[in-house]
Amino acid sequence: MKDFVLPDYKGGSIVNLMSSIAKSLGVKNPYPLLKILHPKKLKNVKNITLLIIDGMGFEYLEKKKKSILKDNLVGSMTSVFLPTTACAIPTFLTGVAPQQHAFTGWFMYLKEIGIVSKILPFTPKIGGPAFSKQGVEMKNIFREEAFSNKIKIKNFIINHKEIAYSDFSKVTSKKAKILAYKTLNGFFMQIKKAIKSSNRRKYIYSYWPEFDTINHKYGTDHKKTSKHFIEIEKKLVNFIKSIKDTNTLLIITADHGFKNTPFEKVIRLEDHPKMEECLVLPLCGEGRVAYCYVHPRKTRQFENYVKKKMNKYCHIFKSKDLIDKKYFGMFKPNPKLLDRVGDYILVFKKDHYITDKIKKGMKQDLNVGHHGGVSKQEMIVPLVLINC
């Protein structure tokens, strides 16, 4: 589709970034190297430090007039499909695309237990305790080998205290040392601690989530978003001074960008009962790209309704077709992938998105900012390199 920006898994995505990092550490990764970061640039670096600012899209950064991040911008990459935290962060933490790790969106149907989940918190979509408290282990849901297991050098994973020891974090940080923080100051302090922990070569993964939270609530143009970005930059400048001459390369990027989505562009599933009655499960995926599980006897009704009544809002695809077209990644797909993307995929146009309300009083996802769609704002992320 002419308005689609799709992942460039052949050398221009965050998956390929992980291949370049892996190659520099003597590890083979199935995906090609990132064209704008050859492993030779990392060969003699003592501290390879990947710093993820959740939600910081390339377009957002490129528009800045004065910025240390923009000053050190070397190019752009695509995220994965879907460009969302639940798909991209597992890519950073495994080195492979959703085609292999099979984490397909914030809301994900788990055939293993017959429940639609919020996959990263590992809880039901409607809320409640984590599945692990009910005897279900994340390792039985997520089986892709962690990147921290593949590399042979000392490595660290730095996450906010609320997620540092979560079920998902545990399965993706097997051989890494976990460092937790509470604040932005603490975030940079923990990275510094990891860098200065020894003179040995190290790989450090670090993740800052708050920029994403603010963009969701206020959108990319709000003064609170700008204020937080400026705060990140100020702390980053001081941090760089504190690690001077440590032979560190900061590789700064994001999991996705953001699209501003006005409230009046929301599509409420309950307003489309003829479509809703075709579904056998709540919507999965994201508001900008939804996975639909359709009753086998109602596929024609579903297709006809979407094509006639929803055509100005979204494109409709059979899920298997997008797997076959390599939207989710290259090479052999995870056997669980098809189960996790439904029968049909709705890709929303322009700034539209969809919500479904599945229990009384449930808060609907009426945010100003969204991601997960195929616009350039959502799909394209920056690559910033800073030598310290």
Image (tube, helix red, strand yellow):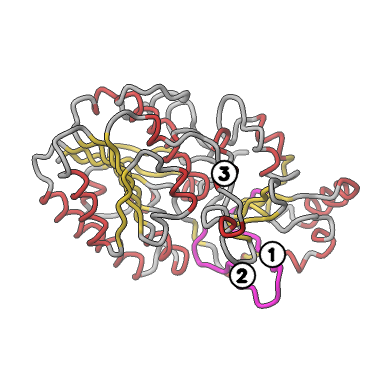
Quarter of the image with the C terminus in it: top left
- Residue range corresponding to the magenta coloring: 346-370
For residue 138, side relative to residue 384 (left or right): right
Which mark is drawn over residue 364? 2
Residue under numbered circle 3: 103
Is the residue under label 1 in contact with that under label 3 (CB below 8 Å)? Answer: no
Q: Secondary structure at mark 1?
A: loop
Q: Is residue 44 magenta?
A: no
Distance from label 1 to label 2 (Cα)? 7 Å
- 10 Å neighbourhood of mark 2: few (<14), some, or many (≥20)? few
Which mark is drawn over residue 356? 1
Distance from label 3 to label 1 (Cα)? 21 Å
Between marks 3 and 1 in the image, the one whose residue lies nearer the viewer: 3
Quarter of the image with the N terminus in it: top right
Distance from label 3 to label 2 (Cα)? 22 Å
- The residue nearer to you, when weighing 206 against 322, is 206
Q: Is residue 200 above or below residue 196?
A: above
Q: Label 2 amino acid?
A: Gln
Dot placed on the residue nearer the N-terminal end, 3 or 2: 3
| Residue 8 shows in this picture | yes
Question: Most prominent secondary structure in the magenta stretch?
Answer: loop
| Residue 3 shows in this picture | no
Q: Is residue 364 magenta?
A: yes
Question: For the image shown, how many numbered marks are present on the structure?
Answer: 3
Residue 85, horizontal then vertical, whole percent: 48, 50
